[in-house]
Image: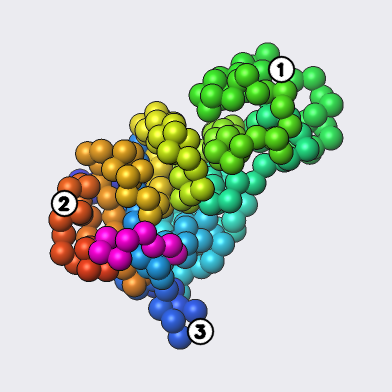
Amino acid sequence: MKKEFILAVEGVNKEFDGFKAISDLNFFLDQGEMRVIIGPNGAGKSTFFDLLTGRTKPDTGKIEFGRATDLTALNEYEINRLGIGRKFQTPSVYVDHTVYENVLLSLKGPRGVFSTLFHRTTPAQRARIDELLELIRLGPKRDLRAGQLAHGEKQWLEIGMLLAQDPQVLLVDEPAAGMTDEETHRTGELLISLAGKHSLVVVEHDMTFVRQIAQDRKITVLHQGHVLCEGRFEEIQADPQVRAVYLGRGKTHK
């Protein structure tokens, strides 16, 4: 019997002005799995996320979500409503609103800013916000404006805002970028706590952070738009191909 995946990417290709950003890419994510993706500059990590969210469309191949939902036929907002949420590297929060209001504005359901902030919240909504603020460890700062938060705290807030939309899959782009060591470790703890309840794909280049969150999980290495190899951290670290194209060059970006 064919195994069902929350995400199935098969034979995907994407070219930009003669440059092949994605080349015969195959990628499969289990329900509740957290997968870390690493790769050198130009490996196709950002394009991969763009394809999953409908920001760009593949030239060939298929991308399926859940039980055979064809994502290539959908727009960005339709994919988001299905339950695929994306967090970009730079946090995007409502800086003039409080931490509490940021999460309130992100709760699942059609709302405008005015109607949301001035309409009485239900007990269930308040309980959900309290739960999320505790999860991201910003409960004590619930009444602080988001613009006053430290960089790491803004990252956690945006993760909380994503969770408020009740996504099935979270795409997280370099969450540890610009963080202190302590913030990085706390971010890792947060993401680990989400695995199982949600499916996650995390793009990262900080190998200390990758070691923390990957643990005994599978890591995917992208190179020139396709999967170079997959395996556990120790296997990836020892692979001569990976060392040649990625680890041997130190920290790399997209």
* Residue depicted at x 65% and y 23%: 141
* Mark 3 residue crowding within 10 angstroms, few (<14) / some (14–19) / many (20+): few
Disc 1 from disc 2: Cα separation: 49 Å
Inspect the magenta stretch and tell me whether residue 249 lies in it: yes
Residue 235 marker: 2
Q: Residue at x 39, y 62 (%)?
A: 252
Q: Earlier in the sequence, mark 3 or mark 2?
A: 3
Q: Which of label 1 and label 2 is nearer to you?
A: 2
Element under disc 3:
loop
Relative vertical location of residue 26 with respect to residue 159 in this rendering, above or below:
below
Q: Main secondary structure of the magenta part?
A: loop
Is residue 36 on the magenta stretch? no
Point out the stretch of residues depicted in magenta: 246-254
Q: Quick check: marks 3 and 1 in contact, CB under 8 Å?
A: no
Viewer-proximal residue among 27 and 229: 229
Q: Which comes sooner in the sequence, label 1 or label 2? A: 1
Q: Between tags 3 and 1, which lies in front?
A: 3
User: The disc labelled 3 sits on which kind of residue?
Assistant: Asp
